[in-house]
Image: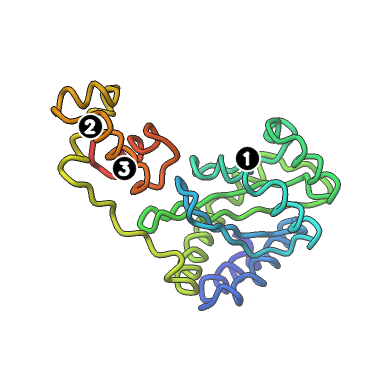
């Protein structure tokens, strides 16, 4: 590893606050050829947690992103599901062509994002690097992958120190015996009427419990609640 790289990584890992670590990370990004650098912290699978970020992107881009693209960001969607780098390209943004056009307009289309998943706290910490020129090649990604994973682990810990109440993992969802029975039957594909017949309760009672399950898991529908229950270990 180059001497300068080793030195800057050491400086980042010695930083005690995110405000001190980010300028070092920004310099590191410049040294590997990227003008723009940003960190985003989000929580996969929930809409109640508002992601937040720190970056040196242009104010115009940050405003446009928040107003138009934050709710449907392919970078976030990908990084919530993968540990591998996300290479920015027209194809990668095929479902959000306006976002790709905006990146080009702001001269930020040559970039990539690297996620890190903090399983203990259910957080996804993503570094995004961008530049106005020169395509990003796979060799660059593989050359920096291990370094950024190491750095991201430390940065995620700094965010936890800075914002503990906001980032703390929510308490586990508690289900009643009846809710547990119903979510298991939902997972088997049973309708509310069928569940009512099996449990000898009214269909409206089943729907009441399903509504509670959706609320408890912060889900958008019954199937999402079933998936969340499975991830929580109930199924």
Quadrant in the rendering for residue 39: bottom right
Q: Secondary structure at mark 1?
A: helix
Q: Secondary structure at mark 3?
A: helix
Marks 2,3: beta carbons within 8 A:
no
Q: Secondary structure at mark 2?
A: helix
Q: Along the polypeptide, which appears first: circle 2 or circle 3?
A: 2
Q: Residue sitting at 63 percent across and 42 percent down?
A: 72
Residue under label 2, please give it: 184
| Callout in the foreground (2, 3) | 3
Q: Nearer the viewer, residue 216 or 28?
A: 216
x then y, percent, for residue 142: 59, 44
Q: Residue sitting at 29 percent across and 45 percent down?
A: 232
Q: Residue sitting at 38 percent across and 58 percent down?
A: 121
Res. 74 mark = 1
x then y, percent, for residue 79: 54, 44
> How much space separates mark 2 and mark 1, taking CA atoms?
32 Å
Q: Along the polypeptide, which appears first: circle 2 or circle 1?
A: 1
């Amino acid at each position: 590893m180059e001497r300068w790289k080793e030195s800057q990584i050491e400086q980042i890992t010695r930083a005690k606050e995110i405000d001190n670590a980010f300028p070092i990370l920004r310099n590191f990004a410049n040294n590997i050829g990227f003008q723009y650098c940003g960190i985003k912290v989000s929580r996969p699978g929930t809409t109640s947690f508002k992601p937040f970020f720190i970056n040196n992107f242009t104010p115009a881009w940050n405003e446009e992103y928040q107003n138009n693209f934050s709710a449907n960001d392919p970078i976030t969607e990908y990084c919530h599901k993968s540990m591998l780098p996300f290479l920015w390209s027209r194809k990668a943004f095929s479902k959000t062509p306006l976002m790709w056009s905006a990146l080009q307009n702001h001269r930020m289309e040559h970039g990539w994002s690297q996620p890190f998943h903090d399983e203990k706290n259910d957080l996804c910490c993503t570094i995004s690097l961008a530049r106005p020129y020169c395509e990003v090649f796979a060799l660059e990604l593989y050359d920096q992958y291990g370094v950024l994973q190491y750095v991201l682990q430390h940065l995620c810990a700094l965010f936890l120190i800075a914002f503990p109440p906001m980032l703390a993992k929510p308490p586990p969802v508690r289900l009643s015996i009846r809710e547990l029975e119903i979510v298991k039957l939902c997972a088997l594909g049973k309708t509310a009427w069928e569940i009512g017949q099996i449990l000898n309760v009214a269909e409206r009672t089943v729907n009441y419990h399903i509504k509670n399950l959706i609320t408890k898991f912060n889900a958008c529908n019954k199937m999402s609640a079933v998936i969340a229950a499975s991830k929580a270990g109930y199924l």
